Image (spheres, rainbow, N blue to C red):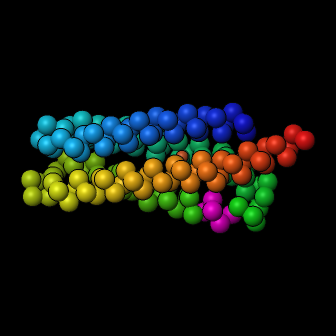
Amino acid sequence: MKEIINQLKDDHIRVNASLDKMEQLIDTPLETSRDELVSEFQFFKDFACKIHHKRESEVLYNWMKKQNPEADKEIIERINEEHKSLESEVNNFIEKITKMAKEEENTILCDIEQFIRVYKQHIEKEEKFIFLIAQQLTEKKTT
Ligand SMILES: [Fe+2]
Ligand SMILES: [Fe+2]
């Protein structure tokens, strides 16, 4: 399980880099950055939503629930719920940015800013709470 935790931390570095890139892109006029923004969200969908969330939920979190069925259930369920809503947001953004009319620009950019903030908080929660709990569980196993 230790390798999985390290893998997930490496994933977070890639995901954070993508969020930073989005942050830069929403600072420039959308006429020039629209295509790049769409492809950044597409990367996010393919990597963060389809690969990274799966690794977390299906490998690490399921394992944790088996180790400690009651104690960590609540926080894991909450974080899994966050995955679902973040994934649907990403899908919406891809569609919205592609079709966006000029007058919707500000609202969408604000929504993206909010999304970046929420996703970064999600990563922090995982690293500060869940990965730490997981690490302690793996240490318990080896002693
Ligand atoms: Fe996650
Ligand atoms: Fe994560």
Which of the 4 quarters of the picture holds residue 20?
top left
Q: Position of residue 143 (x, y in %)?
A: 90, 41
> Could you tell me how many numbered marks the image carries?
0
Q: Position of residue 35 (x, y in %)?
A: 20, 37
User: Which residue sits at x=44%, y=60%?
Assistant: 85
Q: Position of residue 107 (x, y in %)?
A: 20, 60
Drawn side of residue 33 relative to residue 17, left or right: left
Comparing 142 with 55, the one in front is 142
Q: Is residue 128 visible?
A: yes
User: Which residue sits at x=79%, y=43%?
Assistant: 138
Q: Is residue 42 visible?
A: no
Comparing 58 with 121, the one in front is 121
* Segment tinted magenta in the rendering: 73-77
Instruction: Specify whether residue 121 is painted magenta.
Output: no
Report the predominant secondary structure element of the magenta stretch. Answer: helix
Drawn side of residue 19 relative to residue 4, left or right: left
Q: Is residue 91 above or below residue 28?
A: below
User: Which residue sits at x=36%, y=54%?
Assistant: 115
